[in-house]
Image: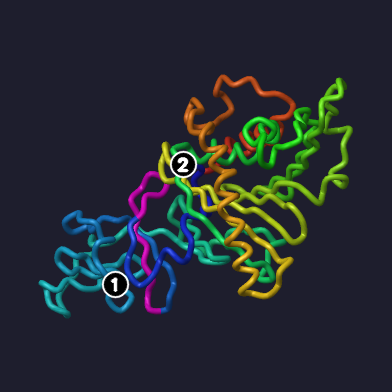
Amino acid sequence: MIRNQWYVVTESSEVGSAPIGVTRMGEKMVFWRDQTGKVNAAVDRCPHRGVRLSVGKVEEGHLQCPFHGFEFDASGKCILIPANGRNGVIPSALQLSTYPTYEAHGFIWLWWGDSTAQELPPPKFFDNIDESFCYASARDPWEAHYSRVIENQLDVVHLPFIHRNTIGRGNRTVVDGPVVEWKGDKMLYTYVFNRLDDGTAPRKPSELSPKSAASVHLEFIFPNLWQNFISEEVRIMAAFVPVDNEHTLLYLRFYQKFMRLPVLGKLIAQLAMPMNVYIAHEDRRVVTTQQPRASGLKTGEILIQGDLPIIEYRKKRAALQSLGQQP
């Protein structure tokens, strides 16, 4: 995983009035909402006797341990030890390790990295998805490293093979380009030019113009957000949530705004989800077999021109990993 990044880790609807325990980035975490509705996150282990705080409850916005009733506020500070009385002394060492969180667009982000006293800039989202869209979502577990699941969605070569009977119909096996553009430091655009094999060699990216494919393209925001820009009114979006080095949660969404009536718009989005999940499972069957489990610059794989988005992803990921490891 890349440190010092905002990761989408769950959907807002999954964190309610009771604490929930999850594994993210290989760590046991607990999420809860305080009295204002703000989502808080901490290590899921009471510093007193080591039990899971996620099986406790929330009392007036504070996380209460189920074992001895110790209560912790959003900063992780212990504010009550019932056995010592409400005015009793609380050892300063009774402190939970907490994580900064951010909530928007129906997602919860978590800052996974070095603790910081300074205010963090908010995480980025797709500025071309706004409140005019209706969406439906699915939560899909994959037994794969999150980097492999991401690369699958940047892979423009596999479509006529993995998806030969769905989105890859037409046998467009030749990949011209593709064209890759960086929009700032952490957003990657991929323009796709797949065609039938007429005996001519694939055109190089320098021979192609993004403008001719701008209406249909892929967008990726580091570290774990992706969008298939199908049209101005239809999008597929995904968050690739790292559980640990062997497991990923794919939060898949279908956005549409050709039907503006909220109830019907939501219904249309929901009706589209089974097919989107089916297509994702066409990928999952193969991606879960990849070795090594995580991608990287030195995996022993021999890449081709059509893999340019994956090459760019790996270079940027390696650079961010190196930057995140610096003191």
Q: Is residue 183 above or below residue 75?
A: above
Q: What amino acid does circle 1 point to? A: Val
Q: Main secondary structure of the magenta part?
A: strand
Give the residues drawn in magenta, as a range: 22-35
30 inside magenta stretch: yes
Left or right: 289 in relation to 236: left
Q: Which mark is residue 185?
A: none
Q: In which quarter of the view is residue 131 placed?
A: bottom right
Residue 1 x/y as whole percent: 48, 41
Residue drawn at 81 percent across, 51 percent down? 215
Left or right: 175 in relation to 59: right
Left or right: 55 in relation to 209: left
- For disc 2, the marked residue is 142
Are there few (<14), some (14-19), or many (20+) residues within 10 Å of tag 2? some
Q: What amino acid does circle 2 point to? A: Trp
Q: CA distance from mark 1 to mark 2?
A: 31 Å
Indicate the secondary structure of the residue bearing disc 1: strand
For the residues labelled 1 and 2, say whether their Cβ atoms are less than 8 Å apart.
no
First in sequence: mark 1 or mark 2? Answer: 1
Left or right: 32 in relation to 95: right
12 inside magenta stretch: no
Determine if residue 46 is in view.
Answer: yes
Q: Which mark is residue 58?
A: 1
Along the viewing direction, whichever of 259 and 235 lies nearer the viewer: 259
Residue 99 x/y as whole percent: 41, 58
Residue drawn at 62 percent across, 33 percent down? 162
Residue 220 x/y as whole percent: 65, 48
Residue 55 x/y as whole percent: 25, 61
